[in-house]
Image: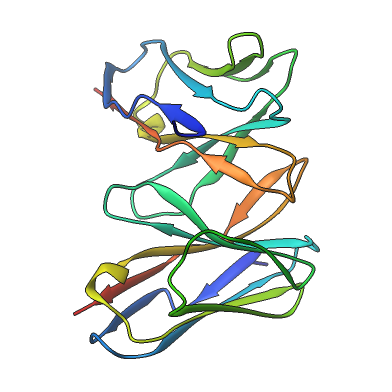
Amino acid sequence: RKEVEQDPGPFNVPEGATVAFNCTYSNSASQSFFWYRQDCRKEPKLLMSVYSSGNEDGRFTAQLNRASQYISLLIRDSKLSDSATYLCVVNENNFNKFYFGSGTKLNVKP
Amino acid sequence: DTAVSQTPKYLVTQMGNDKSIKCEQNLGHDTMYWYKQDSKKFLKIMFSYNNKELIINETVPNRFSPKSPDKAHLNLHINSLELGDSAVYFCASSNEIYGYTFGSGTRLTVV
């Protein structure tokens, strides 16, 4: 079983739609959680950290469910520029060892 | 200022050659990594160094040899390149609170 699993998609949504991704992790001792965004042929970049209490940054909301061992990312009012691959990242607090999901591809259409 | 910089950005080389990729970070992070992203886009950790000390070596062939002269640098040397080594190689540094910062990647093509 992979440490971090994501639906690869693609999720094809119209502009203005609300879309949500989930990511499950296998190690209940995981400590830190992040969502990264990767554009085609570019490096992954931090989108937001995921806190136990959940957090929101503009149109983006991230939540953590420790009981069910998943994190989620909600994007409201999708923009064309949101088209990218979204990577879930989990830190097991072991010498800074981070596990990446394989990414969920989002295509926002006009 | 670029936080994590790696060179070269593109590398095309023949099978059997030896090549190096360099990485430097100016974030003051103690931990640096090499990741490989293959054609299926899956990011897989290869090596991790914490303050110049190797802490993670994820079943990478010994043709790959990382070197960390100081905690701000982590270079990757690859011997006897094979077709299957073609991928994008990302250097990164991290701390536990803010996660990773990646370099812009080195696209290696072995022909």
Residue A6 in the image: above or below residue A103: above
At x 27% / y 89%, what residue is drawn? B16
Q: Which quadrant would the N terminus of chain B be assigned to in this image?
A: bottom right
Q: How many marks?
A: 0
At x 44% / y 31%, what residue is drawn? A1
Res B96 → quadrant: top right
At x 33% / y 73%, what residue is drawn? B108
Res A64 → quadrant: top right
Residue A67 in the image: above or below residue A38: above
Q: Which residue reaches farthest left?
A: B111
Residue in the foreground of this view, choosing between A94 and B26: A94
Residue in the foreground of this view, choosing between A57 and B108: B108
Q: Is residue B61 left or right of residue B46?
A: left
Specify the color scheme: rainbow
At x 62% / y 44%, what residue is drawn? A98
Residue A75 is situated, as x and y percent measured from the top left of the image, at 48, 17
Residue B47 is situated, as x and y percent measured from the top left of the image, at 58, 63
Q: Is residue A73 left or right of residue A66?
A: left
Residue B40 is situated, as x and y percent measured from the top left of the image, at 28, 47
Q: Which quadrant would the C terminus of chain B be assigned to in this image?
A: bottom left
